[in-house]
Image (cartoon, helix red, strand yellow):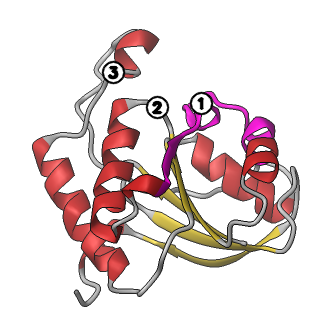
């Protein structure tokens, strides 16, 4: 399986809001526009996704929807509560294995620091690897058998500014 991990685009400021208010933050207009350019760059790689899983938080859903629109993959978009910022990676992995075992190219859209911890967990078996996934940053992991713990190899980790420059 190829596991693609994408952090949501630029969102409204969180300030000192409550967790409930943080859960409602949306992409800014500039963030949505930038994400559209990044998605076009992603599309230029000739990828196709069998499944797009996103956090239910608006900023992640909006990011995933932009990507799904650009890729013509809206019907492959699903919500995963396990991708919220305080989500459970074991639940996410179990859900993918249970409900989507034959998918070859899966895109996960979510939040930091959850996504960096997930990448670390899949690469080295714990969450201590210092990874900084920028907003709209994108990562590809190759996985023979998806499991909780060390099971993946890193193919690449791209900053958003590089993705915007990809040939469209």
Q: Residue furthest front?
A: 75
Give the number of the disc on residue 109. none
The answer to whether residue 56 is above or below residue 90 is: above
Task: Using a 10 Å C-alpha cutoff, classify the residue at mark 3 as few (fewer than 14 neighbours), some (14 to 19) or many (20 or more).
Answer: few
C-alpha distance separating marks 1 and 2: 6 Å
- Could you say which disc has been placed on residue 81 in the image? 1
Marker disc for residue 56: 2
Residue 11: quarter of image: top left
Magenta segment boundaries in residue numbering: 76-93
8 or 46, which lies in front?
A: 46
Is 125 left or right of 13, judged from the image as shown? right
Q: Residue at x 73, y 72 (%)?
A: 1
* Quarter of the rendering containing residue 84: top right
Q: Quadrant of the C terminus?
A: bottom left
Q: Position of residue 156 (x, y in %)?
A: 57, 78
Q: Which residue does the image show at 49% across and 41% down from the upper left?
A: 111
Would you say 149 lies left or right of 165 here?
right
For the residues labelled 1 and 2, say whether their Cβ atoms are less than 8 Å apart. Answer: yes
Tell which circle, 3 or 1, labels the residue nearer the N-terminal end: 3
* Closer to us: 104 or 93: 104
* Secondary structure beneath label 2: loop
């Amino acid at each position: 399986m190829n596991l693609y991990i994408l952090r949501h685009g630029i969102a409204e400021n969180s300030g000192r809001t409550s967790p409930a208010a943080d859960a409602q933050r949306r992409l800014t207009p500039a963030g949505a526009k930038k994400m559209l350019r990044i998605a076009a760059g992603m599309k230029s790689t000739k990828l196709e996704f069998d499944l797009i899983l996103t956090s239910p938080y608006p900023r992640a859903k909006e990011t995933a929807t932009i990507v799904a629109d650009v890729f013509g993959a809206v019907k492959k978009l699903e919500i995963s509560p396990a991708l919220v910022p305080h989500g459970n990676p074991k639940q996410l992995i179990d859900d993918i294995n249970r409900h989507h075992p034959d998918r070859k190219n899966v895109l996960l859209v979510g939040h930091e620091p959850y996504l960096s911890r997930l990448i670390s967990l899949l690469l080295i078996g714990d969450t201590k690897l210092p990874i900084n996934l920028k907003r709209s940053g994108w990562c590809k992991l190759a996985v023979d058998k998806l499991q909780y713990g060390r099971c993946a190899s890193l193919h690449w980790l791209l900053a958003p500014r590089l993705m915007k420059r990809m040939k469209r």
